[in-house]
Image (cartoon, rainbow, N blue to C red):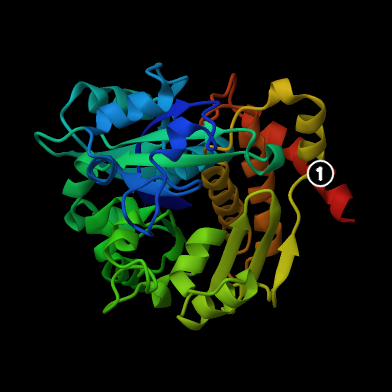
């Protein structure tokens, strides 16, 4: 089994306990959609925030964080976090490979060394003169009655230099191709239809996970975001689309998640999964590749909700929950395809694993879980899944 992934790969500079209601945050708060100001749960580019505030981006961050250093610097991004999760929980003999573009600055070198700690093959191009992609994550654990929320300031760096030519035939001839957070890698996003079509033609199953698309939000806050481009959308070539409530709303212009999923499926994707933070996950299928799910909500783990409510000192933050959710779905789909290549994939089973993997991320700061020994993460997920199975019985 070969799984290849590409997309958003960066450093997260994580700041905990930044109140999204504080005067420091609110003076940078967006007043019009796409104006470059901050929004809870949203993402802006550092350059746009600088223009919005009339200050250098570094001064904006210093004001928001009161000049303190980040609580943690961690690998982040929907693509790399999901792929690391898969590499940690899937058989070691499987071929898990990740493709990215980094810069030539010291932080890019550091990120490369961090990537080497995980059991996956790396294919990296370098962009001379570019910095490492990065995101400042402002995390407020008290938001949404303790469910937590974040606001993101992204610096694209070498992601702007990503070229579709960096993806070789070994990538496209995989059993599964994962495309994670392509909106933060503009050259990838704009070619997503061509690339996913190429992978499909070579027999790959395409899994795509979205991220807040500030580029298109700023350019046109009224109309729907494109997945790919408006002229050449990628939907017909995507087998599983994983998105959150806000991203689904902006992709479909539908407020209700059931209507949003129906719209996205009508554009051609085979299955749609919409996460909603602490609320139920919604799943619906269209393709015969999957056992039919005509539209179903899946609750989050009661075990985790209760445990963190009773033991708040165990709480990390919500960063990476969605990315690990996608990694859990990816891992389950891969196991099912390996066990029965001809049979339909049970997305209900995959979503349960995603919920357990995403929930586990609440116990640590940042998206990547540092295992003490191989198999530790999967063991913890199985414990959560055992409780979840009883919860759903």
Residue position marked by numbered label 1 in the rendering:
302
- Quick one: which residue is furthest to the top in this view? 68
* Residue located 26% across and 24% down the image: 107
Residue 273 left/right relative to 349: left
- Residue 65: quarter of image: top left
- Quick one: which residue is furthest to the bottom in this view? 266
* Residue located 49% across and 44% down the image: 82
Q: Position of residue 219 (x, y in %)?
A: 27, 64
Considering the numbered disc 1 on the image, is that residue within a helix, a strand or a loop?
helix
- Residue 140: quarter of image: top right
Residue 240 left/right relative to 343: left
Q: Position of residue 12 (x, y in %)?
A: 40, 32
Q: Position of residue 328 (x, y in %)?
A: 60, 47
Q: Is residue 74 visible?
A: no
- Quick one: which residue is furthest to the left in this view? 128
Q: As rendered, which of 273 and 278 lies closer to the eye?
A: 278
Within-10-Å neighbours for mark 1: few <14, some 14–19, many 20+: some
Q: As rendered, which of 144 and 349 lies closer to the eye?
A: 144
Q: As rendered, which of 320 and 24 lies closer to the eye?
A: 24
């Amino acid at each position: 089994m070969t799984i290849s992934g590409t997309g958003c790969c960066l450093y997260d500079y994580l700041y905990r306990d930044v109140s999204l209601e504080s005067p420091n945050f609110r003076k940078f708060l967006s007043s019009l959609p796409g104006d470059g100001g901050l929004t809870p749960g949203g993402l802006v580019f550092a350059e746009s925030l600088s223009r919005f505030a009339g200050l250098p981006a570094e001064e904006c961050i210093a004001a928001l964080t009161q000049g303190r250093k980040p609580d943690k610097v961690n690998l982040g991004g929907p693509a790399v976090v999901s792929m690391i999760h898969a590499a940690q929980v899937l058989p070691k003999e499987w071929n898990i490979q990740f493709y990215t573009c980094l810069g030539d600055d010291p932080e890019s070198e550091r990120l490369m060394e961090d990537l080497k700690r995980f059991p996956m093959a790396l294919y990296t191009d370098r962009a001379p003169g570019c910095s490492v992609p990065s995101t400042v994550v402002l995390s407020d654990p008290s938001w949404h009655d303790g469910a937590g929320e974040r606001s993101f300031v992204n610096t694209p760096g070498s992601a702007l230099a990503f070229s579709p030519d960096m993806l070789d035939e070994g990538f496209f001839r995989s059993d599964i191709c994962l495309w994670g957070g392509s909106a933060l890698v503009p050259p990838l996003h704009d070619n997503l239809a061509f690339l996913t079509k190429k992978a499909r033609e070579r027999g790959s199953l395409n899994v795509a996970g979205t991220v807040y698309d500030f580029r298109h939000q700023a350019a046109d806050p009224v109309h729907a975001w494109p997945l790919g481009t408006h002229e050449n959308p990628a939907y017909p070539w995507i087998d599983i689309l994983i998105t959150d409530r806000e991203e689904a709303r902006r992709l479909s212009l539908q407020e209700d998640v059931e209507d949003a999923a129906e719209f996205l499926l009508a554009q051609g994707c085979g299955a749609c999964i919409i996460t909603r933070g602490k609320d139920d996950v919604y799943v619906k299928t269209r393709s015969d590749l999957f056992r039919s799910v005509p539209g179903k909500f899946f609750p989050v783990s009661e075990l985790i909700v209760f445990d963190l409510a009773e033991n708040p000192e165990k709480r990390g933050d919500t960063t990476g929950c969605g990315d690990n959710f996608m990694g859990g779905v990816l891992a389950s789909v891969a196991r099912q395809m390996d066990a029965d290549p001809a049979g339909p994939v049970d997305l209900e089973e995959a979503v349960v694993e995603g919920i357990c993997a995403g929930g586990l991320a609440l116990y640590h700061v940042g998206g990547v879980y540092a295992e003490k020994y191989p198999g530790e993460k999967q063991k913890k997920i199985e414990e959560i899944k055992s409780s979840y199975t009883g919860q759903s019985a």
